[in-house]
Amino acid sequence: MTSSITTASKGSKILGLTSLVGFVVLVLLAFFVTDPDIRFHPETGEEFGQFDAVRLLYLHVPLIAVTYLAFVVCAIASAGYLVKRTFWWDSMAHAAGEVGTLTCALVLITGSIWGRPVWNTWWEWGDVRVMSTLILFLLFLGYLALRGAFVSPQRAARPAAIVALIAVLDIPLINRSVEWWENRTLHQKSTLSELKIEDLTLFTLMLGILVALLVMSWLILHRFRVAWLEHAEFEQGIKTAIEERRQIDNED
Amino acid sequence: MKRLFADIRLITSKDLKIELRSRVLINQVAPFALIILVLFGIALDADQKSLRNFASGLFWISVLLCALMAISRSMTIERDDEALVGLNLSGVDPLAIFLGKTCAIAIQLLILEIFLGVGIILLYRSEVEDFWLLVSTGLFACIAVSALGTIFGFLASGLGVRETLLPILLLPLLLPVLIGATRAFDDALGVAAINGWNWFAFVAGLTVILTTVGAGANYLLADN
């Protein structure tokens, strides 16, 4: 009889299902129910705005929020590892770092697709926020490459924790860049904190953030459990090797 | 404090003596820098105007590529025969090891910057309009590169893949330094009408932050 190892639990299944339902509702609201962004010039009456491209922001903005959160979780868990030196903290940092890198890539992709019709460019080299987000992505790619370079997860833990703590310093820079370098960015200042949007648009955006949070939690949970199983397998491998060695010694 | 400075001087002179004896900087890194300058010239089809306009960027990319070699070299001499373990056990303050190695790499990079600077003036026909802006930016940026390079060199030193890992870890963090130093050089070389001293202030601020971050990371790395 073979034992089946799974990373799922009753709680994670409920979380996954909720995320899926939430995502479907979000897609319906974002792409079919909400209105496109069409405004009229007060003097000329000419149409302007983001039109249908605004719908992408219901994905792009929540992805930014969860990217920040995942990297902050990664940094907190890294600091936790440096203090406690336990595998739990290291696995949490690894899981959050990996999920954050994935969502950061999606931020850059959705931002680029949105930027084409709205800013008339796929990529803006002079935009401080775009560039600092790219730097964040590259820093965490380095973080994952560093982790992958070690054979033993235990040996990777401390260097990786230090890199995560350095890399996360980029987040305040990204967040404040629109204020500090006003004339070097195409991004607008914070819309959410000043609540310049309302009604269904605001609801959809908030739902997007909630769904993104649920999906991120689900991904981190499963990645954490995979890391835990990998660790158990690694430890078991060492134990088995020692046992085999002992048996050989006893036979001799 | 006196002991710390003595240890820093000791580590710096040790690294520089090894460098002087092995002559890797002169025999390998400097020719590599020259090759990069020539390659850029060929890649841009020897268009003198483009070369002069892009000289700052090409200069700093060359510095970063050469810095990777210098950092890698600095860590290799500590890895052979587990010299770094011996150094850590010798009772020298870890901060002195970090700052000493940073100083040694910074001195080597400064020599390379002078070499590359002469190279862009001769090959790309760049003209220096603000000498002190050039010198100040070159000095601070190379300290920033050396400080971060040392810490990431330590992080990757025990790995077989450090040559490929070091650029992935280091270069993204150095991008703001690259941007600031290039803009300051643009002004110093008279190819852009911007206030280069503002960009110098940006580079100097980054240097202080990155060196502090490097020292903090070194403390965490050395703490067992």
Image (cartoon, rainbow, N blue to C red):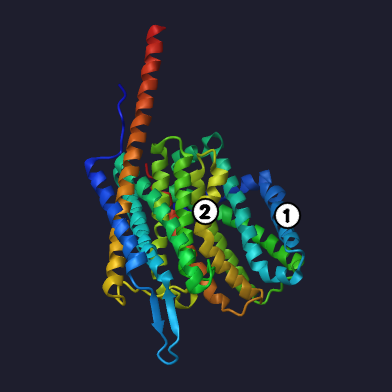
Q: Can you give x and y, in whole percent of width and height, for residue A168 in the image?
A: 39, 57
> What residue is shown at x 37% (from left), y 60% (from top)?
A63
Q: On what subunit does the disc labeled 2 rest?
A: B
> What residue is shown at x 60% (from left), y 57% (from top)?
B64
**Residue marked by disc 2:** B170
Q: Is residue B190 visible?
A: yes
**Residue marked by disc 1:** B35
The amino acid beneath tag 1 is: Ile
Give whichever of A29, B56 is nearer the camera. Answer: A29
**Badge 2 element:** helix
Q: On what subunit does the disc labeled 1 rest?
A: B
Placement of A184 over or under A241, stated as above or below:
below
**Res A222 quadrant in image:** top left
Q: Residue furthest top?
A: A252
Give whichever of B113, B43 is nearer the camera. Answer: B43
Q: CA distance from mark 2 to mark 1?
A: 22 Å
> What residue is shown at x 42% (from left), y 56% (from top)?
A167
The amino acid beneath tag 2 is: Leu
Sequence-wise first label, 2 or 1:
1
**Res B42 quadrant in image:** bottom right
Q: Can you give x and y, in whole percent of width and height, for residue B60 in the image?
A: 62, 62
Neighbours of disc 1 within 10 Å: few (<14), some (14-19), many (20+): few
Whether residue A77 sits left or right of residue A109 in the image: it is left
Whether residue B72 sits left or right of residue B39 in the image: it is left
Q: Quadrant of the C terminus of chain A?
A: top left
Q: Are marks 2 and 1 in contact (CB under 8 Å)?
A: no
